[in-house]
Image (tube, rainbow, N blue to C red):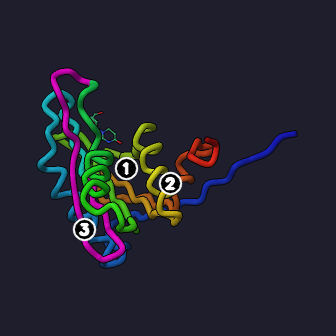
Amino acid sequence: MKKDIQIGYEYFKNSSELSNIERTLFERAKLARENAYAPYSQFLVGCAVLLENGDIYSGNNQENAAFPSGLCAERTTLFWVAANFPKEKIKKIFVVGGPKEFSEKNPPIPPCGACRQSLLEFETKQNENIDLYFSSMNEEVIKVKSIKDLLPFSFDATFL
Ligand code: THU
């Protein structure tokens, strides 16, 4: 029996199509991207997280000479937020990435597989969806309304 999985997403051609809070998150993620420590890949990623109480926190990718010891922007940011505000729900996450010398052609940068799995854990833990946005520096933005949309057939705590 053949079955299909459909994934809905929103596409914004320009950040001017975003709401005020979405644009604020975009700006915060772009600012955080500038402080990324990525001397090996020269690929800078910033992430901004909106909490239920309205606070915004941001982070970026942190690389290491022993390559696997580095960490993506999403997990750097999420783990810090969870370590400091374990009870606050996460409403929205905005990711902005691209080569240090970016061009208008760089497409939106989606979270890597490991980050998707980590992001999913937060959604499962808080039992509430998280809006995820990802973009390059060229202002095109993609939005999904749940991390599950990025991870069909996902593994979570319900299987344990
Ligand atoms: N990177 C992120 O920060 N987030 C992603 O989802 C994709 C990749 C970082 C990891 C590494 O520092 C650089 O981008 C190149 O892979």
* Residue located at (25% from left, 46% from top): 45
Identify the residue at horizontal 62%, vertical 48% (top origin): 158
Name the residue tied to disc 3. 56
Q: Quadrant of residue 40?
A: top left
* Amino acid tagged 1: Pro
SS for callout 3: strand
Residue at 42% x, 65% y is 12
Q: Is residue 150 left or right of residue 140?
A: right
Tell me the residue that label 1 is attached to: 108
Q: Say whether disc 1 or disc 3 marks the residue closer to the N-terminus.
A: 3
Classed neighbour count for the residue bearing mark 3: other residues with Cα under 10 Å, few (<14), some (14–19), many (≥20): some
Which of the image's four quarters has the C terminus?
top right
Measured Cα–Cα span from mark 2 to mark 1: 16 Å
The disc, 2 or 1, on the residue closer to the chain's N-terminal end is 1
In the rendered image, residue 78, in percent from the top left (x then y), is placed at 31, 52
Given residues 8 and 80, the one toward you in this image is: 80
- Does the residue tagged 2 have its C-beta within 8 Å of any atom of ligand 1? no
| Relative side of 94 to 7, left or right | left
Extent of the magenta region: 47-67
Q: How many marks?
A: 3
- Classify 5 as above or below 132: above
Q: Quadrant of the N terminus?
A: top right
Residue at horizontal 36%, vertical 77%? 19
Q: Which residue is the extreme one toward the right?
A: 1
